[in-house]
Image (spheres, rainbow, N blue to C red):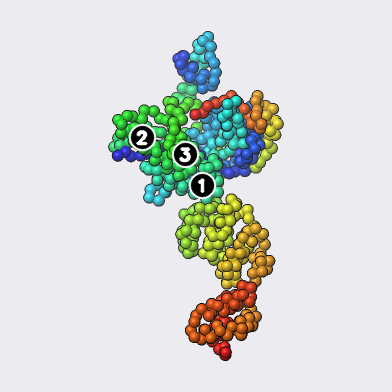
Amino acid sequence: MLSKEEIDHVAELARLHVDDSEYELYGKQLYDILSEIEKIESVDVEGETKIMISPCTNINEYSNDSIGPMLSKEDILKNVKHSNGDYIVVPTVINE
Amino acid sequence: MYETVVGIEVHVELKSNSKVFSHSQNEYSTEPNLYVNEIDLGYPGVLPVLNKKVIEMALQASLALNCKINKVMHFDRKNYFYPDLPKGYQITEQDTPIGYDGYIDIGDKKIGIERLHIEEDTCKSIHGKRGTMLDANRAGVPLIEIVSKPDMRSPEDAVKYLTKLREILLYLGISDVKIEEGSMRCDCNVSIHKPGTPLGTKIEIKNIGSINNVGEAIKYEIKRQSEILDNGDKIEHEETRRLDDKTMTTILMRVKETGNDYRYFPEPDIPYVELSDDWINDVKANMPVFADELKEKYKNLGINDNNIKTIIGRLDLCQFLESVIDSVDPVTASNLLTGDILSYLNKNYVSINKIKLNKDNFSELVNDITGGKISSKQAKELVPYLIENGGSVKDAVDTLGLNEITDTNALNDIVKRVLDSNPESIKDYNDGKDRAIKYLMGQIMKETGGKANPAIASQILMSLIKDYKL
């Protein structure tokens, strides 16, 4: 099980609210996920040059630095809740 | 006394045509949200596709900074909640930076490069009372982040390091590297400690607006931190500060919390990037010439140090000179470029590529000067004309009425006429008064509207005056 503080920390990072009744459920689910990751971590990969990081083994495809279609400002702003002139407006964040 | 330890992180915007993971145009605009598509806005279901050009530019930078290359790379997601990043994560290279373990030679020592990696820029945000306003033009613009080792020991080291780094990137032609415009951004980590004791607590200074101000910020930090330690106090926490360029002091932005929790994991949407030896060699073979090599070359060609410094500092001038250097006299060319031409460019804030003086008429002009066809006085009139109007030097000379009279017969007649009407001066000359010649030359110039070739006219004058019978 994960502690209440650990669950709160993960929830905070994802900006999620956790009800008191949910701690037990999330605690178990997160613990199960971490256990699976521990299993993966225990695999001996010494000397392995190609560790899988991607779920596919495709060779990467590149784009060729050409300019393609872009969205009109009308379309961009259609999909946002708030706008001001040509800007997208979101709730104020204070960085400093 | 304390020892200062400085490490610098630099973000540089690459000037590819399109963004790093989308086909949107990579261009600065004052008009917000102009160069944006679904990928830049992180719409559900979109897939990033890596721009090959960006890899090549980052590879060039890595090679130029003497880095080792990660031949198999993957990208990672750096997760954080902030509205400048609509996806909720930034695609970066946490585990496998394209370049690592390099260095920059700053003259008296080498500064290590820890890593160089590719990542995407974020939206530009303007914080207001009624909300934060977002412009996604910058979202997805390719960046390289260059992290130095903590090898700098003084503000001077830091300024030298950044000047050199900027010059290298400028000459690679992969970025505008303009700090004032944000295409190069510097964050410095500064700490002080007594030699022989453990390193001090790091203070980060963010987003400093010029290379010189990086030096000033470090100077101030050394003073501030020394005072704290001298008082017997400790620098307890890592902090992020910013430079106030009015007072040249640093101001606390925030105390750093224990380790940012970015929950990096490999970006599953982008398969492995494999850099084959052929690809790396191809990029190596096409590396441009660097400033240091050019300085050496110009020195050997006899260009003076001041001109070299000026030309190397202006990439457009340097590239222009390079384009003509094999067909003209380099010294004359450099004098013209750093003289009236540069004054014009500076005054009008333009690049040499945007004016009508071009490779062809510039070469013609230099060759006419070195060939004695055009005097330097005439060149002074021709330069502004060619910059504004273009066309050949020959046409410009005609239009401006600068045709020199070099025809010896014609000049002979003119000189004779001048002598006939100035017997006094001939008498003065015979009496050994040198100024008579000056006066007579003046009369010849007056007669020809200034067009007589001075060298030929003076030769004719000297030969005629000797035998002149009064």
Which residue is nearer to you in this view: B416 or B46? B416
Mark sitting earlier along the chain (3/2) = 2
Q: Measured from the top left, where is residue B457 in percent x and y?
A: 58, 78
Q: Quadrant of the C terminus of chain B?
A: bottom right
Q: Measured from the top left, where is residue B94 in percent x and y?
A: 49, 33
Could you tell me which residue is drawn at 55 percent across and 26 percent down? A93
From mark 3 to mark 2, how far is it between C-alphas?
20 Å
Mark sitting earlier along the chain (1/3) = 1
Rendered position, B315 above or below B80: below
Marks 2 and 1: CB-CB under 8 Å? no
Name the residue furthest top.
A21
Q: Measured from the top left, where is residue B432 in percent x and y?
A: 48, 84
From mark 1 to mark 3, how far is it between C-alphas?
29 Å
Rendered position, B173 above or below B235: below
Q: Disc 3 vs disc 2: which is toward the camera? A: 3
Which residue is nearer to you in this view: A48 or B285? B285
Q: Quadrant of residue B318?
A: bottom right
Characterize the local packing of mark 2: few (<14), some (14-19) or many (20 or more) Cα atoms within 10 angstroms. many
Q: Quadrant of residue B49?
A: top right
Residue linked to disc 2: B225
Q: Quadrant of the N terminus of chain B?
A: top left
Q: Amino acid at mark 2?
A: Gln
**Chain for numbered disc 2:** B
Residue linked to disc 3: B246
Q: Amino acid at mark 3?
A: Lys
From mark 2 to mark 1, how far is it between C-alphas?
33 Å
Name the residue furthest front.
B424
> Is there any visible trace of residue B379 in the rendered image?
yes
Residue linked to disc 1: B169
- In the rendered structure, the answer to whether residue B208 lies left or right of residue B234 reads right
Could you tell me which residue is drawn at 50 percent across and 56 percent down? B310
